[in-house]
Image: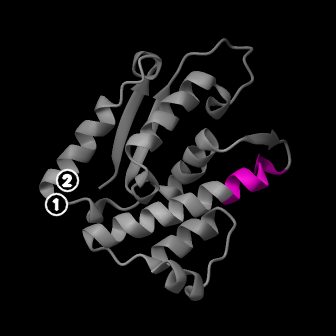
Amino acid sequence: MTTTIALNSDLIQTLDLSPVQSAIEKLLQEGAIASEEQQLRFEIDYPREPEDPRELSEIPEVRLWFIRLDAQYPWMPFLLDWKAGELARYTAMLVPHQFNRTEGIEYNPEALEIFVMQKIFVLTQWMKQIGIPSTSRLKSIAKMLGYELDDAFFELIG
């Protein structure tokens, strides 16, 4: 079941993570965190001037909120609804990038590589702790962001 967390300018301006904390705490108490894989979406209502061409990921206040979220829940990519574009948007909030009219979002390659590897390390450890098989899931995350990881890599960090 998809969970949508609504964010508004007040939550963003005050760096308030309470809507996410409530959702995560509920999942943890119910022991349902594993069943919520790829089920989380964010609905962001952040007012901008009509002539403001920036994407949400280019607004410093919005990015700062997501940086705080990532510091609190570094395993958040596990929960994000990839099919709805949440993994790409989350990554854009945390990785320097630019938009290209024909190619779409273009991440800074070195920053993206660091982000992907950090998430793989965090998720590997977290998924082991809660008993979720991880290799194929982590390969999928990496692939969504343009990286191929082979089994030998996972044996190395095992």
Residue at the extreme front: 156
Instruction: Give the crowd class for mark 1: few <14, some 14-19, many >=20 residues within 10 Å.
Output: few
Q: Residue at x 46, y 17 (%)?
A: 13
Give the amino acid type for the residue marked by disc 2 in the picture. Answer: Leu
- Indicate the quadrant where residue 11 lies: top left
On residue 117, the disc is none
Give the amino acid type for the residue marked by disc 1 in the picture. Answer: Gly
Considering only vertical position in the picture, is 45 above or below 116?
Answer: above
Between 91 and 104, the residue placed more toward the observer is 91
Q: Residue at x 38, y 41 (%)?
A: 72
Mark 1 highlights which residue? 31
- Span colored in magenta: 103-113
**Secondary structure beneath disc 2?**
helix
Between 88 and 154, the residue placed more toward the observer is 154
Query: x, y (%) of residue 39?
Result: 37, 55
Instruction: Give the crowd class for mark 2: few <14, some 14-19, many >=20 residues within 10 Å.
Output: few
Residue at the extreme top: 49
Q: Quadrant of the N terminus?
A: bottom left
On residue 28, the disc is 2
Between 75 and 40, the residue placed more toward the observer is 75
Query: x, y (%) of residue 99?
Result: 79, 40
* Residue 149 included in the magenta stretch of the image: no
